[in-house]
Amino acid sequence: MKLNPTLYSNLFLVFLLLITSCKDETKQTKKDIATADPFAQADSIIRSIKVPTFPDKTFDITDFGAINDGETNSTEAFKKAIEACNQAGGGKVLVPSGTFLTGPIHLLDNVNLHLSEGSEILFSTNKSEYLPVVHTSYEGVELMNYSPLVYAYQKKNIALTGRGTLNGQANETNWWPWCGAERYGHKKGEAQQRDDHNLPRLRKMNEEAVPYQDRVFGEGHQLRPAFFQPFGCENVLVQGVTFTNAPFWVMHPIKSTNVTVDGVIVSSHGPNNDGCDPEYSKNVHIKNCVFDTGDDCIAIKSGRNDEGRRVNIPSENIVVEDCRMKDGHGGVVMGSEISAGVRNVFVRNCRMDSPELDRAIRIKTNTLRGGFVENVFVKNIQVGQVKEAVLKINTYYGIYDNQEGEHIPTIQNIHLENVTVAKGGKYGILVQGREERPVKNITLKNVEIKGAETPILVENSEPIQFENVTINGQSMK
């Protein structure tokens, strides 16, 4: 067969054009990625979040028998008002000015529990009121345990709003001693959470994949409940209220979607008093809040060890903005219960400042937790003072408690921009990756850190990319 020279030449020209086109397209794609504003994605996430709205109907708890003397138990009044609101198609359950004592509050679909200015809800110190046990979670492991103080299970369109205060009444004689620490009221010989029938038993059930229905704790056990926990919920709003004296984690949206936390004040310095812990949750917007806590201000989680890998729901699309972080182990933290992974976290326009704030941005995991953290963007952050580090990435968290396994964590794409630090701590930047899987793609741009004892310590990481970064007045290259 004889080839036509003209046809052959034309085919070759077409081939060259295709190659050139592909190269140009690849070049353009790389350029788009390099110049793209990641916070445009944050804005898109915010727009996608459905914030609940409610019919214009009001159900005053005093009309259902609540007494505002701070002594009369109004649990039934709260329950009846919430049920009436739900049955009427939704609306506002009003807590008027005054002090109301109650047991746990369980929200239903389309209910906005609204605390008027000057109102305070005191939660009972009688632990039997938090029974029967409900499906909940403790440090990344699901179980049947005491009810959270405010709880919603697989509900839609719920809210906790207003200018009032929720007082968990946890202190050195109520809930806190169960943590086992003397400074929180624990006395030697008394039962506490590390006893064999508590956390060790729950950890073993996790390893053995015991169904959560058979992990029954509650009475006779010492595992503290969360304060506010929407479990498996859609369209959740927490706005304006103040939380204080929490037994355990303060706000814990778990397996929930479309969560807005706006203008909330957390002032609670007990053990494990994290401010807000989204877990297995998607599309979360935390804004205009003040966190003054006994543990992490915000801690993004996704299950502990085998449990997290079984559930396999990453926490993702989380935007934190215009917040103030005071005391706490960390400002915005990912981990340590992180086995299903965390992605797409955006932090902007926040102020973090306290001699009791340990770190500004923190990632903590180990080889039992494993998991991944990717696509973390931090911008326009003012840090007054931190004790340990501005950025800390630790893949050896808890190793002195024998927390080593075979699940090497993956950490990549961590970006800080426009960050100023008036007084650093022990380190400016502290990164401790794993030799088997080094941390990848950390960039710092327009960052100034003053007063750090050790400017930078990096182990098992790709070289950090610096652009206009100074630590203790020294330009970083």
Image: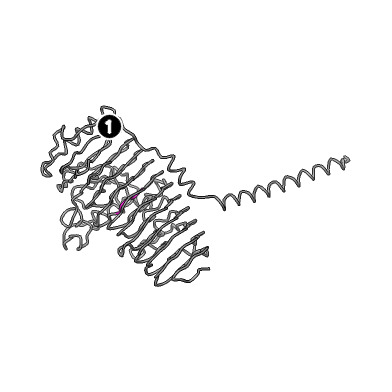
Where, by quadrant of the figure, is residue 61 drawn? top left
Q: Which residue occupies 30% across, 39% down?
A: 159
Q: Is residue 169 left or right of residue 402?
A: left
Disc 1: which residue: 91
Residue 455 horizontal/vertical position (percent): 44, 70
Where, by quadrant of the figure, is residue 428 drawn? bottom left
Q: How would you rate the neighbour count of disc 1 (Cα within 10 Å): few for under 14, some for 14-19, many for 20 or more? A: many
Residue 418: in magenta span: no
Q: Range of the magenta residues? A: 274-278
Residue 33 horizontal/vertical position (percent): 57, 51
**Image vertical order of residue 416 relative to residue 263, above or below:** below
Q: Quadrant of the N terminus?
A: top right
Residue 357 horizontal/vertical position (percent): 32, 62
Where, by quadrant of the figure, is residue 133 drawn? top left
Residue 297 horizontal/vertical position (percent): 32, 55
Q: Is residue 41 left or right of residue 66?
A: right
Question: Considering depth in this image, is 57 or 231 the residue closer to the camera?
Answer: 57
The type of residue carrying mark 1 is Gly
Q: Which residue occupies 33% across, 45% down?
A: 262
